[in-house]
Amino acid sequence: MKRVVAYCRVSTDSEDQANSLENQKMYFNREIQNNPEWELVRLYADEGITGTSTKKRKQFNQMIRDAENKKIDVILTKEVSRFARNTVDALEYTRKLKNMGVEVYFLLDNISTADKDGELRLTIMSSLAQEEARKISERCTWGARRSMEKGVVFGNCILGYDLKDGKLTVNKKEAKIVQDIFHKYLYEGKGLFTISRELMEKGIQTARGNKKWFPTTVKAILENEKYIGDLKQGKTYIEDFLNKKTKKNKGEREFVIIKNNHEPIISREDFEKVQEEMKNRHRDTVKEDKKTKYSNKYAFSGKLICSECR
């Protein structure tokens, strides 16, 4: 009697009903019951997880560990795309399992790693699955960009606005905080550190509900064009659909910019003054750093003055 486990996965909560976890579980139970040489040991299931990477698939990784501990003889999965949509992962793990004496059987694709031509057929099918994943990623990116062009706001809400159904509406209570931050910086001449300290002393929370303020948080508010009613999106992008790593857009991709998209909190004039003031303060800081760097080159630098130079 072979110890058989089944692995199933759905990538999103909106996946078609045919690939739902419950239907996959029923499918495996039926297949195992029809084979008198198989004994169901366990069913592993990852829900709402992409198939292009195995890093976040806890159940998948547990299954591999159990195989390493000699607890499994056969792994059943519905099709190659349920196992992996990454060709490298599919081949790497099936080879690893085969070396441990574990057969992987893809039921709908009728591929078994125990067959002589199993790896060849698996390579073809996993390549097709990976290509389909690439197309899905491109369609999602294209759809998101079209929505951005229509003014739909992506991402988390920011201080001063409420985000609902892709639209920003002014939160009057929070908007006052944003206006105070701009006023402190521009008209009171206060720095990022001082402003962040004063916000904490008043018990004001950030957009995420944190009581801890950092100078970088204040700086991000002062630089955010949303406060003048403009929308600039596409600031980050996914570099590779396989690893899903997000990269900051430094001009590699075109931004989606819409002027006067929503109600402003800060006047455009004050916003531009703040950007200029930030540049000026940065230049002054750099100059001071350079002066300090060279004036402190020796122990008595800046302390002893030549009598001829007085």
Image: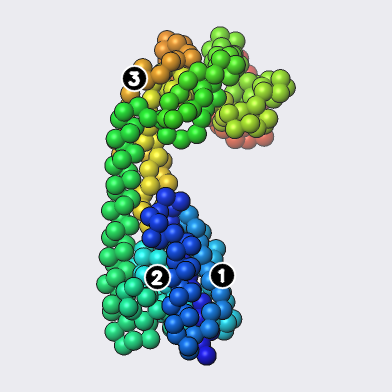
Which of labels 1 and 3 is toward the front?
Answer: 1
213 or 53, nearer to the observer: 53
Q: What type is the residue that disc 1 sits on?
A: Gln
Q: Are marks 1 and 3 in contact (CB under 8 Å)?
A: no
Residue to which mark 2 is pinned? 78
Give the residue drawn at x 36%, y 81%. 112
Q: Secondary structure at mark 1?
A: helix
Q: What type is the residue that disc 2 sits on?
A: Lys
Whether residue 139 can be seen here: yes
237 or 97, nearer to the observer: 97
Q: What type is the residue that disc 3 sits on?
A: Lys
Residue 167, horizontal then vertical, whole percent: 43, 26
Residue 266, relative to residue 118: is it above or below? above
N-term mark: 1 or 3: 1
Horizontal placement of 202 versus 206: left or right? right
- The crowding category of the residue bearing disc 2, from other C-alpha atoms within 10 Å (few below 14, some 14 to 19, many at least 20), is many
- The crowding category of the residue bearing disc 1, from other C-alpha atoms within 10 Å (few below 14, some 14 to 19, many at least 20), is few
41 or 59, nearer to the observer: 41
Which of labels 1 and 2 is toward the front?
Answer: 2
N-term mark: 3 or 2: 2
Residue 207, relative to residue 86: is it above or below? above
Residue 62 numbered tag:
1
Q: Quadrant of residue 124?
A: bottom left
Q: CA distance from mark 1 to mark 3?
A: 50 Å
Q: Are marks 3 and 2 in contact (CB under 8 Å)?
A: no
Residue 259 numbered tag:
3
Q: Are marks 1 and 2 in contact (CB under 8 Å)?
A: no
Q: Quadrant of residue 289?
A: top right
